[in-house]
Amino acid sequence: MAVAPGSSQSYRLPCHAPREHSQAPGGGLRLQLPEILGDCHFESLPLAQGLTLVHSRYHPNRPLIEEASSCHAGRLLVITCALQGTSGYLDTKGSSLAFRAGHTTVTAFQASRGERRYGANETVEQLRLLVGEALLQQYLGPARACELLGQDALQLLACGPTSRASAGHLSALAQPLGLQQPPTLELHIHALSLLSLQLQALAPAPAVPGRRLKAAELERLQRVRDLMFEQMHQPLTVAYLCAAVGLNEFKLKQGLREHYHTTPQRMLLEIRMGHAHRLLEGGCQVAQAAYQVGYRFPGNFSAAFTRFYGKPPKSVFGPCLLYTSPSPRDLSTS
């Protein structure tokens, strides 16, 4: 069927329609829709058994309906982070999903068939993490994984604005997947971190026997996190955070470990690095980004950024100013 660019009539692309694809030694796959539909493609990269990263970018020249069917055995958890544009999914039983820029949607699939829908002349970019049932069982245990995935063909588990913590990992994952290379350790780490953030909300760890966080403690822990976002430019210390929220050091560290599965140092580092990445993408100089996230010396910031993302700040934007002086001994630079 011929496609007239700019036509307002929807074009339906069947599952069996030919798509141009290329495979790389590293295991990555790039799939391209017919060029006459516009620039529509996605790249997938298996990071581990049961863990696949998919980066899609569609810009159809007319309304597009792409038929889709799950080719995965067993149940699947899908984390969809919409980076740009709006699209929808409708399965054969009438269930529907909407994906909007700046939002993260978590769904459970089991042999689902349906169709993806895109508007004309709008760029839709999404990052998806596909998690197999066996991998979820490894991290959650069989009972909790089964309860989370359910038995429905399509189940919406969560949908909301992408968190600041997730945004930092997305910035690293949304780079070209490098189909000529095997998946890197950094990609694997960021993917698992993104998965961990979602599982903390969807399937929190069972309470420790004899230990139950009180509502007041939870509020104080949330205040600690808020302070990190609000004052990341300051040399924050554990002692300061404890005094600010009224918790002793033991309860602060234990609470963050039990509720957020992290440490004060790691939480602050993730918050700082996520914000720094967004500043650099927006055109901020390396030194300016360093100061705004709490580093007095750009050289120390550059080293921390490179360890966290596996690439230097100048690869995101402009030249990096290097200094050799030591950094202050705060939570993330000590």
Image (cartoon, rainbow, N blue to C red):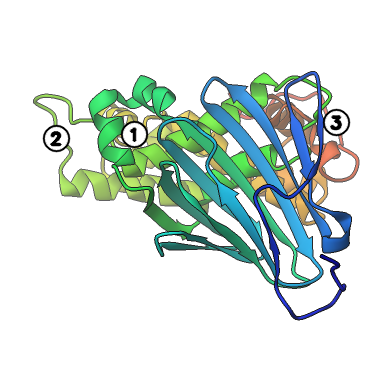
Please, what is the three-letter code of the amino acid marked with disc 2? Arg
Quarter that holds the N terminus = bottom right
Report x, y in % for residue 216.
Answer: 19, 49
- Would you say the residues marked 1 and 3 are in contact, meaning their CB atoms lie under 8 Å apart? no
Mark 2 Cα-neighbour bin, 10 Å: few <14, some 14–19, many ≥20: few
Q: CA distance from mark 1 to mark 2?
A: 13 Å
Task: Farthest residue to the left: give it.
Answer: 210
Residue 329 left/right relative to 257: right
Q: Residue at x 30, y 36 (%)?
A: 259
Q: CA distance from mark 3 to mark 2?
A: 47 Å
- Residue that badge 1 annotates: 256
Please, what is the three-letter code of the amino acid marked with disc 1? Leu
- Residue that badge 3 annotates: 322
- Would you say the residues marked 1 and 2 are in contact, meaning their CB atoms lie under 8 Å apart? no
Number of labels in the image equals 3
Which of disc 2 and disc 1 is earlier in sequence? 2
Q: Secondary structure at mark 1?
A: helix
Which of labels 3 and 2 is toward the front?
2
